[in-house]
Image (tube, rainbow, N blue to C red):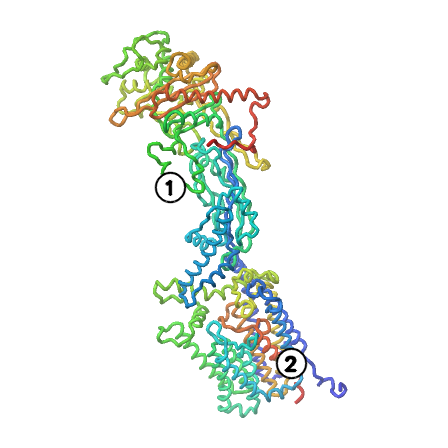
Amino acid sequence: MLIFDQLRKDDPQLRALTALVLAGVLTLLAGLWYVQVISSKRFVDNQRAQAYRTVRIPAARGKILDRNGHPFADNYPNYRINLYLEELPRLFKDEWRRTKPARALLREERLALESMARFTVVSNLSTQLGQVVGQPIAVSLAEFSEHYNSQPALPLTLANQLNAVQIARFQEQPVIPPGLDLDVQPMRSYLYGTTAAHILGYLRRDNQSREGEEADYDFRLPDYRGKVGIEHAFDSTLCGRAGMKSVLVNNLGYRQSESTWVESEPGTNVVLTIDLAIQRAAERGLQAALNETRGAVVVMDCRDGDILAMASAPSFDPNRFIPRISREDWEALSDPKLRPQINRAIQEHYAPGSIFKIITAMACLESGLDPDRSQYNPGFIHVGRRRPIHDLAPPGDYDFKKAFIFSSNTYFISNGLNAGVDRILEISRRLHLGELAGIPLPGQEKPGILPKPGEAPIAWHDGDTANLCIGQGYLSVTPLQMTVMTAAIANGGAVLWPRLIDRLVPQDPLHGSQPLVFKKAQVRDRLNVSKRTLELIQEAMRADVEERGTGKAAHIPGYTVSGKTGTAQVTDPSGKVVDHTVWFASFAPYEDPKYAVVVMVESGASGGGTCAPIARQVFEALRQRDAATAARPAGLAKPAPTFTSTPTPAEG
Amino acid sequence: MIGAIDQESRPRLDWPQIIAVVALLVIGAAFIHSATASNEIFTNRPWFRQPSLWHLIYGAIGLVIAGCLCWIDYRQIARWAIVAYWGSILLLLAVFVFGKEVYGAKRWIGIGPAQVQPSEFAKIGFIFMMAHYLSRPLEELRQPSIFWRALGLMALPFLLILKEPDLGSALLLLPVGLGMLWAAGTPPRWILRLVGAGALVVSLLLVDVLFAPPQWQFKLKDYQRRRLMVYFGIDFAANAPSSERARLHREQRAHSYNVEQALISVGSGGWFGKGWNQGQQITLGYLPRAVSHNDFIFSVIAEEKGFLGSVIVVSLYSVVLFTGIRTAAQSRDRLGRLLAVGVVILFFSQVFINIGMNIRIMPVTGVPLPLLSSGGSSVLCSLIAAGLLQNIHLYRRNY
């Protein structure tokens, strides 16, 4: 060794000292090698864990559009003013120095006072900001402390949804208080308010990670999740993919810098088959019908099954759920009588009443009823040992058409009994009553009730059949099911799957993936009744509106509407009639049926009086739609939706 | 004049050592800059008050003093050993009167804008005094009275520094003093007995401090007791009532915090480090800013320059230490040899304790890293000590 050579052999102390120093140096080097080379990874991880925070950035939600590209649900830019806490420690310190009491403090006291000093700073800043934007802005101590303690690396949002004037005032401020900055966040907005609310559904605050996504974040930016309706059913399509950013924080938890690791991918647009104009006509009609109407309208293109409108009243405004629904609003939504959250078109089932006579008529005609033979109606009918069933049609002679127009119970019960319950039920089954219609709104749709063989009540009497013939008793249907039925009558016997979603279109047209289009005109079943039967019923329905029938309120000059009214009794458990559900099932035009419209109103006066005028308004809108389509050049008969078009905002 | 002195006896400086010392000074200034660049207290100061610049200024002053020392034969300087020793003792006493209290300890005396840390100068005074006192025939060294007096010389500054309190600086005197006694030729078994007895007392003390019920415990400062507990990984809160436990655990974390962060700094440096001024631990403030440029400067170097940087630093210290031992071996008188041994042991102990503390093989004590740590007194004294080595090297043959 270099050193040992120079030491004299007779100097043991220095030799020992050399050995000691050498050993010490080697120990240090070995230790350093162990820490810096062998276990370096562990310390790098430790450092990363203490210095990096990951933040989930929700993607911009996909839009929900009507068939022509009008956005029902869109994202509007929400201008916010954020307070970046990392800009403030100096102010915190100054304030603390200013307010610090002279005496010695206990640890807890000091912490409490320091926290108070911080709050004073933030509170002053928000007051200043409030003066700038001309709107009082307040931060509560609890709110600030919670934010400061849990996520100091993220900005605290002081003001939301600023308007143009406020933004301008903030931007023009020569000296902006420290730490304040403007940012923009996409915010869900339902442009037409209550329109189609039951189909669209609503969102609730939910920052959690979606399935198949990074689950471990330190912080999450506010996100929403669809709870009902399309927002719920297509949540995973609409929500896109959340992005991730990492924030480098210092020892106090303040943000030092940040970088985006994964960009968020915007969600896919959902295009409905709904036509905005028709939907609004249906809703206007419902609203105008009664004071606080409870009812539903379903409009279906009877050629291809497209649902053009599905209205339910009363409705609600899904905008109220953003950012958070207030207690009063929620209580209003939970009103036990109005039940605004229920989609009455599919989520509730009702006795169909006389509109079920369409099915009874089919059964009778198919089993050989001569439509021209007259029968005497005494004004009531006895079936079995039960009390007589009254007929609202006046006593007299009735052939099929007259009985249909006047909705004679006697005629349809006596002939229905002749045809037999099995025939009626068979046709009902081909219409898939008692089954879901397959609307993609999970949890909303109810199947209704239809007696099934083997599942029927213990003893089935003729009285039960009699009730069935006139749409009462052990039977209940949804307005949508009645629409499918009406469409089947109109289109010549095809029982269609209703279609609510037209296609899924990527929000970014350059994304590359093709829109997913759902198939039209999916036939679920066939009525298997003769053409003559259908023609007879169609003619009877036309006469109900066009001639002196119950549905004359739906009459539109120059546009042949055909329909059937119904008034179903609602009984309490003891059998007493407490209310009426009124119906109008219709299609038009008679000559070349295109649209089926079914209107149902709870507690209405009568099908003809309450529902038929609503149907007329809808048909008028449909007629305008047809006129507009016809006016377009042939090549553009079905224009591609323009997603960039700015819609006219909802009225009122 | 050149002709008069032959080739062999021409005074020559120990250049490798000088280069190593200057290199350490410059490295120190560079990383003090890096350690203070993100510290508001320092960035708010003008450039001429930056600690990195002052490190170089103190380094230059120290080099000048060391150069001046080399003009005079160390044997003549050593005549003033008694004055130096008692002077430093007076300074240590003055600390109690004029000292500035920082974190409950009085270690500094303010002279104008500068702060003097007498314990640093006491180390030099002590080495001079011991070397001077032990430079006597071997027979005398074998007399117990001389041995006890030498121990007395050691005990006086030790107790004064301990009282400040500055346990780290005080403890440094023990290996220096004992090493010099042993190098001088005091019978090794005396020293062994002393060390054995000392170790026994210390271990009893440790057991007492760490495990005994409170009323039987030797009175240490609370922070000292906790530092020891942190080093030995003993749970503060083991015997505490449950209401107190959460608070104590928080405190324990806070106490082990410095060590853990230093370890993360060193470990995350890896092979080559993150680059000068790129250390995350320091920019983000995880490495406490109050100590990063003095006691924990090594972790800054290790994080920014990695294992490579650590090896360079340790190698530079090795050059200083081994050339120092060579100087001791080459000196022809007992005084030079003892002085050199004292300085070498002082440097070695500081380096080993300080770097060892960064990688957790030594407990946290406030021992600066010579020539690297920021601090005027420490830099000046380290350079005086290094100048002393040069002096002994220069005048080794003038006997």
Labelled disc at residue A327: 1
Question: Where is residue B70, by image quadrant?
Answer: bottom right
Q: Residues within 10 Å of mark 1 (few under 14, many from 20)?
A: few
Q: Relative to A437, does residue A262 appear above or below in the rendering? A: below
Residue B216 placement (x, y as % from top left): 36, 76
Position in image of residue A352 (x %, y %):
35, 22
Q: Quadrant of residue A206?
A: top left
Residue name at image x 66 percent, y 75 percent: B16
Is residue A30 something that shows in the picture? Answer: no
Q: Can residue A409 be spotted in the picture? A: yes
Residue B229 vs residue B287, the one in the foreground: B287
Label 2: state its secondary structure.
Answer: helix
SS type, badge 1:
helix
Furthest toward the right, the residue is: B3
Q: Chain of mark 1?
A: A
Front-lying residue, A292 or B314: A292
Q: CA distance from mark 2 to mark 1?
A: 85 Å
Judged left or right of residue A311, residue B316 is right
Amino acid at dot 2: Gln
Circle 2 chain: B
Q: Disc 2 designates what residue?
A: B390
Percent across and percent down for residue A72 are 49, 33
Which of the image's four quarters has the N terminus of chain A?
bottom right
Asked if marks 2 and 1 fall on the same chain, the answer is: no
- From the viewer's perspective, is the residue at label 2 or at label 1 nearer? 1
**Three-letter amino acid code of the residue under disc 1:** Arg
Q: Residues within 10 Å of mark 2 (few under 14, many from 20)?
A: many
Q: How many marks?
A: 2
A462 sits left or right of A402 in the view: left
